[in-house]
Amino acid sequence: MAILKIARMGHPVLATPARPVENPAAPEIRALIRDMEETMLDAPGIGLAAPQVHVPLRIVVFLVPERPGELEPRADAARDGADEDPARVPDGLNVLINPVIEPLGEEMEENWEGCLSVPGMTGRVPRFVRIRYSGLDVEGRHFAREAAGFHARVVQHECDHLDGILYPRRMRDLASFGFVEEIRKTHGADAGNEE
Ligand code: NI
């Protein structure tokens, strides 16, 4: 187990599309996933994509906090997902290999996002409200799941990393882009998740 160095915006690995994982059961992939989980929890963050630790492979790990306060200060944003069926919120750590996202409907909503690769910053990002996503789990088994609200937002943010896209590129208006410390003075504690 190891805590890995997180790449910051400007490093080319964050702007390059990642390659599919050919053998999810390979020992080096298992080890990478464990290190990614440890790195994310240490940061602390709620999501991490392999390119963020300088590995150009299509792997993400993420958490969807179930209760506000579980992962301060980010969990307030989970209110976002209030319309989501709680039974569908996955427990604990999620591993997603070679993911594919399909929007369910055209509805989008804006909310605050942050990113471990853009430390200290936050901005309002439009995302699809409902999605279906599929991929391989940590055992290499194919699965598909529907998500809404905050859960859907986290998955879209993390999967963007696999295509070399950081959230500022998704923003419609850079007027809301700024330092978390400053933005929270006017917009409250829900600004700025570390994904
Ligand atoms: Ni991110």
Image (cartoon, rainbow, N blue to C red):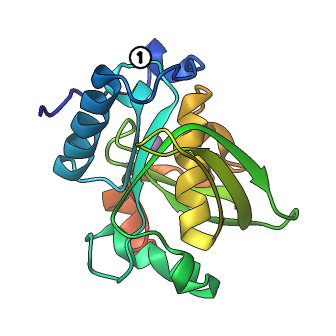
Instruction: Tell me the residue at 55%/69% (across/down).
Output: 150
Question: Mark 1: which amino acid?
Answer: His
| Secondary element at image label 1 | loop
Percent x, y of residue 109: 72, 67
Q: Please state which of residues 111 and 51 is positioned toward the viewer in this rendering.
A: 51
Q: Is residue 15 above or below residue 149?
A: above
- Which quadrant of the rendered structure holds the N terminus? top left
- The residue identified by callout 1 is 11
Q: Please state which of residues 116 and 55 is positioned toward the viewer in this rendering.
A: 55
Q: Please state which of residues 30 and 150 is positioned toward the viewer in this rendering.
A: 30
Percent x, y of residue 85: 60, 84
Ligand 1 placement by image quarter: top left
Q: Is residue 160 left or right of residue 42?
A: right
Instruction: Tell me the residue at 78%/51% (across/down).
Output: 102
Res 110 → quadrant? bottom right
Q: Is residue 26 left or right of residue 122?
A: left
Question: Which residue is farthest left?
Answer: 1
Q: Is residue 9 above or below residue 84?
A: above
Badge 1 crowding class, 10 Å Cα cut-off, few under 14, some 14 to 19, many 20 or more, is: few
Q: Is residue 49 left or right of residue 168?
A: left
Res 3 → quadrant? top left
Q: Is residue 117 visible?
A: yes
Q: How many marks?
A: 1
Q: Is residue 128 visible?
A: no
Question: Which residue is farthest right?
Answer: 106
Q: Is mark 1 within 8 Å of ligand 1?
A: no
